[in-house]
Amino acid sequence: MTSKISKATLSAALIVKNESKNLESCLNSLTGWVDDIVILDSGSEDNTREIAEKYTEHFYLKSNWQGFGLQRQAAQQYVKTDYVLWIDADEIVTEELKNSILKALSDNKTQTAYSINRKSWVFGRFIEHSGWYPDRVTRLYKVSEGHYSDDLVHEKVLLAKDVKLESLKGDLTHYTYDDLQHYLVKSASYAKLSADQKEKRGKKTSLSNATLHAFACFVKMYLIKRGFLDGKQGFLLAVLSAHSTFVKYADLWIRSQPKRPS
């Protein structure tokens, strides 16, 4: 007599802060097909908690912010299912992607993790080039076979040895920026964290290096990655990304300059 193999279980995991505008749409796209939702808040001052608790009992607080990587590691400790699906509050699971995830759970392959394709809506249109699409990110894996790196920003999923990566069908819709002010604030935050991380690792730079990186960023996004096919938004994104790249390296350079005399 053969024993019946039980269905693999899945938790969606989020790290959030002040996400009342986006959170409900995100959680609605998860309702009814994930086994659990785990949310770790880093100190919201809006009604993020009230919205979250309509969808899950597993809402936790960790306000001692130490970077994105460590915050995701802390959230994963609350995941009790076989698999974890990482999603951000400004993302929505499409129907095709949901079905692809459910099939992966049904197959329950050994030593297999999954990448998901993000499709971002920016300044009035979906970006389909510019190096932004396809934007493959590792988001679904067995809890026993992966975790996030310690990086302050641009954290990565670290998979156990011999775990292979497969691609899921369907897009994860990403509503990344509300407006230009939102972009500039978010970009400045990431630039600072990136400079913090490089400084911690003992790296230094120069303004000429910052300029070269910014120029290369624009050329790559707008020409090599065909950002011109994304219209005016593609041009704007290339300019803004070049600016963000310059700021990131300029910040690191400034830190090596003489301090204000007493």
Image (cartoon, rainbow, N blue to C red):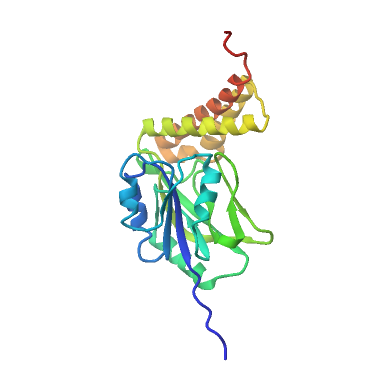
- The residue positioned farthest toward the bottom in the image shown: 1
Q: Is residue 115 visible?
A: yes
Residue 76: x and y in percent read 52, 54
Who is closer to the viewer here, 1 or 28?
A: 1
Quarter of the picture containing the C terminus is top right
Q: Is residue 135 visible?
A: no
Q: Is residue 70 above or below residue 199?
A: below
Who is closer to the viewer here, 114 or 195?
A: 195
Who is closer to the viewer here, 218 or 45?
A: 45
Please name the residue shown 52% across and 43% down the image. 68
- Find residue 215 and report its image quarter: top right
Residue 11: x and y in percent read 46, 61
Residue 31: x and y in percent read 35, 62
Q: How many marks?
A: 0
Please name the residue shown 42% across and 31% down the image. 185
Please name the residue shown 31% across and 51% down the image. 51
- The residue positioned farthest toward the top in the image shown: 262
Please name the residue shown 53% across and 25% down the image. 247
Q: Is residue 32 left or right of residue 88?
A: left
Quarter of the picture containing the N terminus is bottom right
